[in-house]
Amino acid sequence: MDCAKRIGQRYFQAGSGKHRCLDCHMRRLKEDADMESSMAANQEAQRKADNSRRHRLFWRPEIVPGPGRALRSLGVRNMQILRSPSVCVLYNEAHGSVCCAASPQHDRAAAVNIWYLICSLKVLHDHRREPVFSLDPKNPHSIAGETQVKRFEPPWLAGSVVGEVLFQADYALKELCLGERALPLLPDVLSNPTTEATESGERAARQWFVIRRATVTMTNDGVLVPHVEMGVEARRLVLCAEGYKDAEHTDANDPFVQQARTITAHFKDVASQLQAVGELEALAKSMVVARYLLSKGCQCDGSMLNKCVLPMVPEKHEYSLEIPTLARRRRSSSVEQDPISGQVMLNHESQAIHGGVDLHVPALQVAVPPSKPVRLLEPTAPRELLPLFVPLRRAARAA
């Protein structure tokens, strides 16, 4: 009917008194499936826009806290420091004291978000480990189920600005890897990953942010300059009795691993274009400074940390730990003929990715000071004690 060829013994009915040959039938099935997928994609896009508004699945730069309130709560009084949009942290090795000063405008690498530093110290002091976030399927046996659950360690990070940074950065990563976001500088490896499906027909993997390398440089005037190299790691997931778990082996050529390598190689570009990822990098730098100070023997003042009320997101009392699963699972339709039965089959495929953020600081490296003295602050620049740590004499008596 469609190609005007004479139909042989194998044909397919196409309405009243009409028939198609095998090739035309398979082509029409594919066209119908593609049209159905296109309509479904449009409906899905609308649904996702609604979900994004309802569940705030987008980065809000206005929630990033400035240093003023934190410094005032710590007793800092110098107006030059309080009015500065960013501050740096100084360490005096001889006295073991920690101070703050207005961050030099010519070197933004020294800037440390004080709220992130307070939160990092609080987590390390109370829980003896770095914060962790994961976005997991609510039903552990259905990787592409309707709902995902935010899991924070420690749990009190939920609803805090720090917790939101962890979540939004991870969600931006999932959008990037599923094709919801496009970054022009990234290669096509992010476009069409294909892997073997699980028995349930779902493609399962997890990808998460990590700190790959951490370094602290101390200038001659005591300013701590943290450096972090971040990246993404990936693992295939397999279904077991308890739910999905990491596969014992993930092929180095697995598309999910290729995605992770690509993002890692272009991480600075990703962080500059995705604000939530850039803010995650700022949080990681504060974590590195906290680890450095503790490694130098500084002891946290627990009572002072508890006085600092961490900034929360505006909807803190309505903060939801459940969100709809990122639903644009990659659709691909193909029409095939079974070589044995001759039956024509229409195949659909989908993917879902889960993961999170692990801010574990690897072996911290202290950069070798340059041969030429480096001072970031003017000699007259005001400095004030940062009372997040027990004074050295009091710490010595306690020991």
Image (cartoon, rainbow, N blue to C red):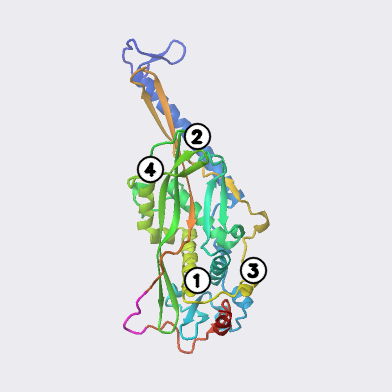
- Cβ atoms under marks 4 and 3 closer than 8 Å: no
Image spot of residue 83 (x, y percent): 57, 78
Q: Earlier in the sequence, mark 2 or mark 1?
A: 2
On the rendered structure, is 31 left or right of 146?
Answer: left
Residue behind mark 3: 309
Residue behind mark 1: 290
Q: Earlier in the sequence, mark 2 or mark 4?
A: 2
Q: Look at the image and say whether residue 368 sits in the magenta stretch.
A: yes
Disc 3 from disc 1: Cα separation: 18 Å
Please, what secondary structure does the residue beneath circle 2 have?
Answer: helix
Disc 4 from disc 1: Cα separation: 38 Å
Image spot of residue 234 (x, y percent): 41, 50
Disc 2 from disc 3: Cα separation: 48 Å
> Label 4: how many residues lie within 10 Å, few (<14), some (14-19) or many (20+)?
some
State the count of labels: 4
Q: Earlier in the sequence, mark 2 or mark 3?
A: 2
Residue behind mark 2: 39
**Image quadrant occupied by the N terminus:** top left
Q: Amino acid at mark 2?
A: Met
Q: Earlier in the sequence, mark 3 or mark 1?
A: 1
On the rendered structure, is 152 left or right of 278?
Answer: right
Q: Earlier in the sequence, mark 4 or mark 1?
A: 4
Front-most of 325 and 31? 325
Q: Earlier in the sequence, mark 4 or mark 3?
A: 4
Range of magenta residues: 367-373
